[in-house]
């Protein structure tokens, strides 16, 4: 029932959501990524949608919230880049790395992927969605999903080899 | 009853699937074949990244650190080791049912007795010295769920 | 007003970093162990398949630390997310301050899952978070733990 609500009420909102995202983020690709990511997230909680008279309003509000978070993140990353002190969980980042096992290393790497790539790689490699399913949920093409998936997977491998060869 | 062993793919087939995997074009079935290949012992080190990555995702899918269910005819192949080589950690699929590890100030402790003592101390901490809390929690224990 | 709050919570859920955890019945407190488990001043324990007082625990995971408001705030945020799905919740409040929280979470298959949180500013290890998975009866485990002292 809840997936039906998603397909009937939320997915058709796609172009409206894209318009809102463009207005907030300006860059076309950022807007497209934001919409795909929010649609995937709404899909994952679509069990909760049934209780609302107006699930579309929830979707629009979530998209706006997500865009604001993205903007905040960009500003924060710019500020961090200017900082000479790098904040870290441990006083000595090499000490921290020595004691990390593979699970932690890979969790870190995946958590640092761009958020849409993160969503897609998790949905595919952990939750076993097929590429076509993800494309259907996000209203994009299988090719677009494959491209993000490929980038994410290559990045994970690259970063893993870099860290494990230290 | 004769056991039918599923043949794993060859290294050549695995290499082709790995390329497809990084292109994002493998199906779930092809990935399962690849997974079965990567679970094998004694594979060349060129596969270590894929072993780590596939093992990680399989562990996540199984529920964060609990023993991964392996459908394998040969029990010996289900051995688990986290092997540290020159600072790099190789991850092989599945974990044993028993695990005991503690970190104190970031320092790892694997001595089973010490870890268990730390766990018991932690349980003790949950009940504060304060009698009020002990009373209240004690009442809670008697409430029927 | 109640409806508005529900909507806000749903939006927060959609935008949260633990979206997969919530959707998949995973837990927000997992982030506590990942983020703080290996820090200085923190003791983290993980034991699986061990027995305590005759009860076999499939998983026992704990984190203890002295007074640290950023860690305790983060733990409380995670518990607030996980308590939404809890079957039963018990809070112990002393002088208006929440001192302990117990969550009995929905079973996953045969597995009972419990979260215990304690904040005792008088103790050296002021903040304690415990997560337990067990195939034993969750109520029995709780009674054992609470009488354990």
Image (tube, coloured by chain):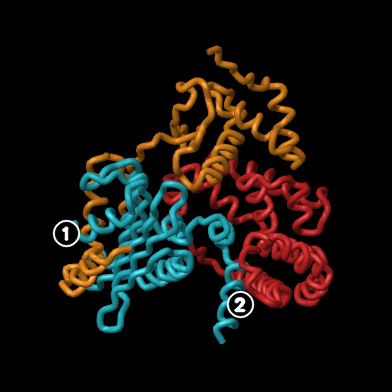
Chain colours: A red, B orange, C cyan
Local secondary structure at mark 2: helix
Whole-percent x, y for residue A98 in the image: 44, 45
Q: Is residue C121 toward the left or the right of residue B9 in the image? A: left
Q: CA–CA distance between discs 1 and 2?
A: 43 Å
To which residue does mark 1 refer? C149
* Residue to which mark 2 is pinned: C7
Furthest-front residue in this view:
B144
> Would you place residue A114 above or below residue B107 in this image?
below
Q: Residues within 10 Å of mark 2 (few under 14, many from 20)?
A: many
Q: Is residue A146 left or right of residue C64?
A: right
Task: Say the numbered circle drawn on residue C91.
Answer: none
Whole-percent x and y of residue A134? 74, 52
In this rendering, is residue C36 above or below A109? below
The residue at 25%/71% (across/down) is C120
Disc 1 chain ID: C
- The residue drawn where x is 50% and y is 56% is C26
Give the residue displayed 75% in from the left and 50% down from the top: A133
Element type where label 1 sits in the image: loop
How many marks do you count on the picture?
2
Instruction: Return the x and y of residue A62 as percentages of the image width and height.
Output: 67, 73
Residue B78 percent across, percent down from the top left: 47, 27
Q: Earlier in the sequence, mark 1 or mark 2?
A: 2
């Amino acid at each position: 029932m809840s997936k039906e609500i998603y397909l009937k009420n939320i997915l058709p909102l796609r172009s409206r959501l894209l318009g809102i995202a463009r207005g907030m983020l300006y860059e076309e690709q950022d807007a497209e990524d934001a919409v795909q990511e929010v649609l995937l997230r709404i899909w994952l909680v679509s069990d909760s949608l049934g209780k609302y008279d107006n699930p579309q309003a929830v979707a629009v509000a979530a998209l706006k919230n997500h865009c604001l978070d993205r903007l905040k993140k960009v500003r924060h990353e710019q500020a961090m880049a200017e900082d000479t002190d790098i904040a870290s969980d441990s006083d000595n980042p090499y000490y921290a790395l020595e004691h990390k096992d593979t699970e932690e290393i890979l969790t870190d790497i995946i958590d640092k992927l761009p958020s849409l790539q993160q969503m897609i790689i998790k949905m595919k490699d952990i939750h076993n969605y097929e590429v076509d399913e993800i494309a259907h949920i996000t209203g994009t093409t299988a090719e677009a999903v494959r491209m993000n998936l490929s980038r994410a997977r290559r990045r994970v491998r690259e970063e893993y080899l870099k860290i494990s060869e230290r | 009853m004769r056991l039918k062993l599923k043949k794993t793919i060859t290294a050549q087939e695995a290499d082709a699937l790995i390329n497809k995997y990084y292109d994002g074009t493998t199906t779930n079935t092809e990935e399962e074949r690849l997974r079965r290949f990567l679970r094998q012992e004694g594979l060349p080190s060129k596969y270590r990244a894929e072993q780590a990555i596939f093992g990680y995702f399989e562990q996540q899918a199984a529920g964060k650190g609990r023993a991964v269910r392996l459908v394998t005819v040969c029990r010996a192949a289900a051995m688990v080791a986290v092997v540290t080589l020159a600072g790099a950690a190789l991850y092989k699929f599945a974990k044993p049912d028993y695990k005991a590890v503690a970190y104190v100030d970031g320092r790892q402790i694997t001595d089973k007795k010490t870890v268990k003592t730390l766990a018991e101390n932690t349980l003790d901490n949950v009940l504060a010295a304060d009698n009020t809390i002990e009373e209240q929690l004690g009442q809670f224990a008697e409430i029927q769920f | 007003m109640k409806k508005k709050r529900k909507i806000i919570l749903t939006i927060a859920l959609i935008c949260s970093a633990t979206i997969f955890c919530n959707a998949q019945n995973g837990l927000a407190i997992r982030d506590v162990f990942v983020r703080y488990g290996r820090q200085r001043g923190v003791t983290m324990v993980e034991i699986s398949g061990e027995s305590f007082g005759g009860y076999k625990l499939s998983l026992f995971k704990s984190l203890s630390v002295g007074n640290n408001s950023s860690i305790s705030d983060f733990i409380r945020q995670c518990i607030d997310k996980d308590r939404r799905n809890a079957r039963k919740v018990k809070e112990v409040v002393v002088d208006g301050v929440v001192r302990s929280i117990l969550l009995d979470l929905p079973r996953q298959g045969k597995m009972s899952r419990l979260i215990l949180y304690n904040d005792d500013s008088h103790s050296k290890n002021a903040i304690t978070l415990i997560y337990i998975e067990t195939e034993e009866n969750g109520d029995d485990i709780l009674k054992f733990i609470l009488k354990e002292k």
